[in-house]
Image: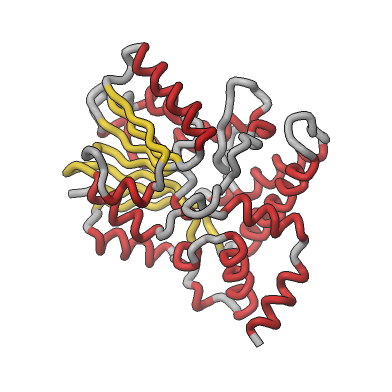
Amino acid sequence: MIEGAVALLLGLLAPSLVRYLVSRFRSSYGHEAYGDALQHAALNIRCDSLWLNMGFWAKTVDFPTACQDLALQLVQHARLDATLPRGQSSVLELGCGCGETFRVWQATFRPDVIDAVTTMRSHAVIAEQRLRDLTDANLLRDHHLYQRDAIEYTRNPDRRYDAVIALDCAYHFDTRAAFLRNAYGCLQTGGTLALTDIVMLQPISKLGAFDRLKQWAVCRLAGVPWTNMVTDMEEYVTLLQGIGYNNINIRDISSDVFEPLAAFLEERAGDANFGVVSRTIWWEYLAFASVLRWWHRGRQVGFVLIAAQKP
């Protein structure tokens, strides 16, 4: 019965959506989440920009600006610019991508040590060079770039940090709960965990059977751990408290993320800017836009800012 229902659901999903979900969400802990070809360059247009996150679109329609604004929102939400001493703090960033965020951290709370982790070789090469440039300019005292699994590194970090940051990547980790526990061990006393994440806005038990089946099928296709996608806000807080975090602050910013990102992807595809990547990739971005609109309309899934502290 279940197998038949899943088969029916998959038959209704467009092939491009299936392909995109697999490539977009499948974790590089076994599979690359975004591919190693820097195809996200098409979203940036500016040749000096390689941002890749869902963005915060309250004041812009420009992709790189929205991505930068999401990083700034996280800094402000976690009060990193107010609580960390400028030029005297150490930061671990997981899922750092090509290192666009490093400039945001330097412009706000200015850490003197940045360690960063990514699994993707093409991203690691660019991020490493950006860290070197900051060090050569005497903006960093020390840095390390690890091309490793985030769960593996945080299990036994090389040092303790004043802040652990995960911008738009925690839902990839296998599992999120393991990441949150490991991050606690990475922090110094008084250190801050700052991340964005995708969570259920209501308990999974309150969803109808078909909606639960759709969520499960998306996770199954995409290689996202089911436990990551079914966690609701209340369970998230309970999990953080159980690990030992305090001063927990969660803010839902879904309305400034899902719908405007979907509109941007649809507009860019409509402009037929196919010179950077193949037409197939743009169709996959369109498929992802349809998922974002589904999330936005249903109010079942939310995009949140999270901050917590190690006492």
Q: Position of residue 3 (x, y in %)?
A: 66, 81
Q: Is residue 252 visible?
A: no
* Residue 175 versus residue 270 in the image, above or below: below
Residue at 22% x, 38% y: name it.
Answer: 159
* Percent position of residue 46, x then y: 65, 22
Picture quadrant of residue 160: top left
**Rendered image coloring scheme:** secondary structure
For image coordinates 65% across by 49% down, the residue present is: 259
Residue lying farthest to the bottom in this orientation: 1
Rendering coords of residue 297 (x, y %): 66, 60
Residue 1, given in percent of the width and then of the height, sits at 66, 88
Outermost residue, top side:
137
- Splitting the image into 4 quarters, where does residue 207 fall? bottom right
- Asked whether 45 or 249 is in front, the reply is 45
Q: Is residue 253 above or below residue 44?
A: below
What residue is rendered at 69% in x and 32% in y? 42
